[in-house]
Image (tube, rainbow, N blue to C red):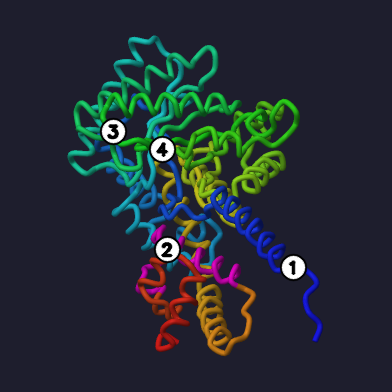
Amino acid sequence: MTLPSLPTDFTRDLAARLAAADGALSRLYPGDSGRRQPVHTVYVGADRFQADLVARYGASALEALAEHAPEPADLARALGLPEDLAAAIHPRIVEKIQREPIEDLRLDFEDGYGNRPDAEEDGHVREAAEAVASGMASGSLPPTVGIRIKPFSAELAARGIRTLDLFLTTVVERAGRLPPEFVVTLPKARLAAQVEALADLLDRLEAALSLAPGAVRLEVMIETTQAVFDVEGRVQLRQLVAAGRGRTTGAHFGVYDYTTALEITAAHQTLDHPACDLARQLIQAALAGTGVELSDGATNVLPVGTQEAVHAAWRLHYGHVRRALAGGLYQGWDLHPAQLPTRYAAVYAFFLEGLPAAAARLASFVAQATRATLEGAVFEDVATGQGLLNYLLRAIHCGALAEEEARAQTGLTGPELAGRSFAGILLGRRSDPAET
């Protein structure tokens, strides 16, 4: 009998080293955060925010839909959709806007607000913070909310710091706490030191306001070339995220500042410009598996004016959202209430179009993998199964699909869906063959 050549202690030590390295890598790439990622972030100038803004946006969105696409056939013509698909998504759009028009809201003290005298901005900070506290009391805020401060540049850092301090202090004084999952967005990040400074600031504010450590999340906006590449030409996106010391949960792409930095003329500064594709792909590749949620930018052609103008803007917005979804970006910015119908139209159409095939494939994968496991064979497509499960979960979370529909189409149970793990489903069914 031929015996292995290597000593047992060598192979054991080598395996332990590999296991330690793999564990270290897994900590750097923890995967899905487990949070429900919103399909959009709505930006509104902080001076225009009031506690009932979400309801007012919903009402305006429904008015736009009633005026420009009151029936499924109208939506089909406006967006160039098959009539059966429009018939499926139109009532879901109405229900979604009635129930939850905005998933994520950002009160903007940067580009959507401008540079104003300190006394004026201080007043708007207090008013916006008091409105947030009022919205918390009345339950009128969206699931997640936050503010975008001014960039930490030499000229504006002091103003951004003051705004954040005054805003958080006022909300906590009025409400005794912050909204859940509160987030601060740092625009035009160029250096890891800027993100680190924001993390330091949040540490101090949480301590001063008796908030739990890490209660405030942060997002970085990738809208400068320096955010992507450092001075030596190396991709530094991971360094930007790491500088938040565990607080960084989002990276948002800012298309217009980014394309301006590349000297692309205004007429060609669009979400589908090849330069934006490269930036998005670098962001995705650098941050995949980290749990940091990525967001695309905004369509700045707004659906206002004549029906022809509204429909043209809707088709542009719809196309941008569908393109992002196909590229693996499930969140984007919205700037106007009348963009909500096309945001949800694009998201729902994307998921419902592919749902029958995805659900059937997922059910088949579960059955095949379970049989292979029970029979001692090897199943090598767990990654594909997880991808199909992720697709289904996103469809549920955004409202395109009810959980009951998902269970009926796939044969999965509620706990299996809640577990969010294809490997976990297989393990559970192996432990309990009755599930098969």
Q: Say left or right for 295 vs 66.
A: right
Residue in the foreground of this view, choosing between 31 and 282: 31
Does 337 sit above or below residue 425? above
- What's the CA distance linking mark 4 and mark 2? 27 Å
Query: What number is the disc on residue 400?
Result: 2
Instruction: Judge the density around disc 4: few (<14), some (14-19), many (≥20) Cα neighbours within 10 Å.
Output: some
Give the SS element for disc 2.
loop
Q: Residue at x 46, y 24 (%)?
A: 110
Which badge, 4 or 3, is on the more N-terminal residue?
3
Q: Nearer the viewer, residue 371 or 264?
A: 371
* Mark-to-mark CA distance, 4 and 3: 12 Å
Single out the mark in the foreground, 1 or 2. Answer: 1
At a point 50% along the width and 70% down the height, the residue shown is: 422
Above or below 170: residue 412:
below
Q: Earlier in the sequence, mark 2 or mark 3?
A: 3
Please identify the dominant SS of the magenta region.
helix
Q: Which mark is residue 297?
A: none
Q: Are the two marked residues, 2 and 3, in contact with CB atoms closer than 8 angstroms? A: no
Residue 304 appears anywhere in the view:
no
Mark 3 crowd level (few <14, some 14–19, many ≥20, 10 Å Cα): some
Q: Which residue is mark 1?
A: 7
Quickly name the residue at label 4.
217
